[in-house]
Amino acid sequence: MNKAALQKLIVEKKSCLCVGLDPDFTKMPPHLLQLKDPVFEFNKAIIDATKPYCVAYKPNFAFYEALGAKGWESLKKTVDYIGDTHFKIADAKRGDIGNTAKQYAKSVFETLNFDAITLSPYMGLDSVAPFLEYDNKWVILLALTSNKSAANFQLLKTENNHYLFEDIIQKSLQWPNNNRIMYVVGATNTDYLNLVRKSAPESFLLIPGIGTQGGDIKAVIQNGGTEKVNLLINVARSIIYADNNVDFQQAVAAKAKAYQQTIYKELNI
Amino acid sequence: MNKAALQKLIVEKKSCLCVGLDPDFTKMPPHLLQLKDPVFEFNKAIIDATKPYCVAYKPNFAFYEALGAKGWESLKKTVDYIGDTHFKIADAKRGDIGNTAKQYAKSVFETLNFDAITLSPYMGLDSVAPFLEYDNKWVILLALTSNKSAANFQLLKTENNHYLFEDIIQKSLQWPNNNRIMYVVGATNTDYLNLVRKSAPESFLLIPGIGTQGGDIKAVIQNGGTEKVNLLINVARSIIYADNNVDFQQAVAAKAKAYQQTIYKELNI
């Protein structure tokens, strides 16, 4: 999916909501655990309930890999089930080089047919370039994450007299195919969001940290949004674990709809 | 495996060689491709041929994940086949937080029974702490990698007036259970290796970039070794793809032995 198509989808759906698919046996409705593939059944139910309200899905790979080969199968089925109506983000936070990065790219963009992958920038261009070679596929670089210890390194001041996360954005915007780069920017601090927009005025930003992790949708859109929105606001737990009864889909749909409406109220589209 | 056990293994095997298990269909002996699980058969043959000469194995996860669920099964079989005689490194280069990191830790240390995992430091302590909670398991933080674009960010000077990779080492050595942290340090520059040893005089270092990637074993051991060695020198392609005929194991064993002997000559053990 290219930039124009994603922007169009946001206008059509009146939403820039991304739903995080982080299946956890200890939190999902217990009646699903008796089924043959609880992870896929859970995801399928979540997708059915939320698809009118979101433009993207983001499975976090850790939850699938923790289940070994079976988790990988559930992930493949989930991606296939989503289909091409939504933007599909592989939240893999990978970062490796050369041949290895090529293998990752093949796995995520070809075998699994994701539209985008989250990558750690620490190893630099080599670790990103193989992913950027794919037309209509995206790299989402970790810039400023929403966790407490993000400050350990991301907020170090560098020789360029700004934060490390700003270096990462500015440097990566000089790389080939930089028009296929998005950035992860945690929603917990709007001052930093303004700094990100100074460095990357037109890039798409993926915003985690809304919902269970806190963060304010209005502030995010006001400080991080552009004329064409160019934001994906991710919510996982507060939507997908809204309820764990047999009829959990109703509460999940209601929660997703509430987020969509809160988001739409702030968007100028 | 704890530090004393790993140090003892190095003395016993007269080697600090780690063999990288990066199975690639385009490079492995073609007769294996007809078998039911070529990746496992290849790894099994490599392990049988190299186990007298090395102390550790390091499967790079990207090569397995590129194959989907089947790759995951080959990886599990490979780890089980190695057993407890060697140190097993999950080269996963992960970096995620909280619940997600816990899932990764469980996957790698419990489901797959690895001794160590490589992690990206970019997200800070939150992304590392869940791995450090395991007794006798190790985190190997990316400090200075051996790829060309490592310089993009790892060699930025920070407010602390040294390189970012030095910040990462110094900061992480203040974290709880820091005695279970090793560092990845590319072999391509011995000046940097000296800087690493100033920050981490007694930590184990995992050294990639030897073999196909270049790098000089003598210089690495002289600049990076300690009294108790505390080095793992990784070689992948130059050993595992030494030959691709039916009797490839002979060339693989000979190459591993040659590396072991070159290493042993430089070690004071």
Image (cartoon, coloured by chain):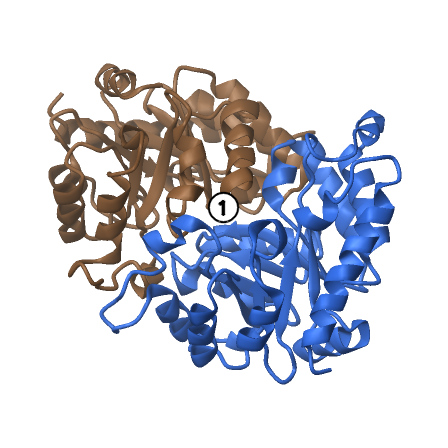
Chain colours: A brown, B blue
Question: Which of the two residues, B152 or A31, is positioned nearer the viewer here?
Answer: B152
Q: Can residue B212 be seen in this view?
A: yes
Per the image, the residue denoted by label 1 is A96
Can you say whether A2 is above or below A205 in the image? above
Q: Kindly identify the residue that appears in the image at 17 percent across and 58 percent down.
A: A162
Residue A23 seen in render: no
Expressed as whole percent of the image width and height from the top left, the position of residue A43 reads 52, 29
* A166 on left or right of A31: left
The quarter of the picture where the N terminus of chain B appears is bottom right
Q: Residue furthest bottom?
A: B227
Q: Which of A162 and B97 is in front in this view?
A: A162
Question: Given the image, on which type of amino acid does mark 1 rest?
Answer: Asp
x then y, percent, for residue A178:
28, 33
Q: Which of A51 and A73 is in front in this view?
A: A73
The reply, left or right, for residue B26 in relation to residue B117 is right
Instruction: Give above or below for A129 relative to B212.
Output: above
Mark 1: secondary structure: loop
Number of callouts: 1
Position of residue B232 in the picture relative to residue A105 (left or right)? right
Q: How crowded is mark 1: few (under 14 residues within 10 Å), some or many (20 or more)?
A: many
- Asked whether, in this view, residue A206 is left or right of residue B130, the answer is left
- Where residue B195 sits: x, y (%)? 42, 75
The quarter holding residue A160 reads: bottom left
Q: Quadrant of residue A67?
A: top right
Say above or below: A78 vs B8: above
Identity of the residue drawn at 79% across and 40% down: B42
Instruction: Chain letter for mark 1, please.
Output: A
Name the residue at 73% across, 82% down: B269
Q: Which residue is drawn at 25% across and 61% down?
A: A155
In the rendered image, residue B217, in percent from the top left (x then y), is placed at 62, 66
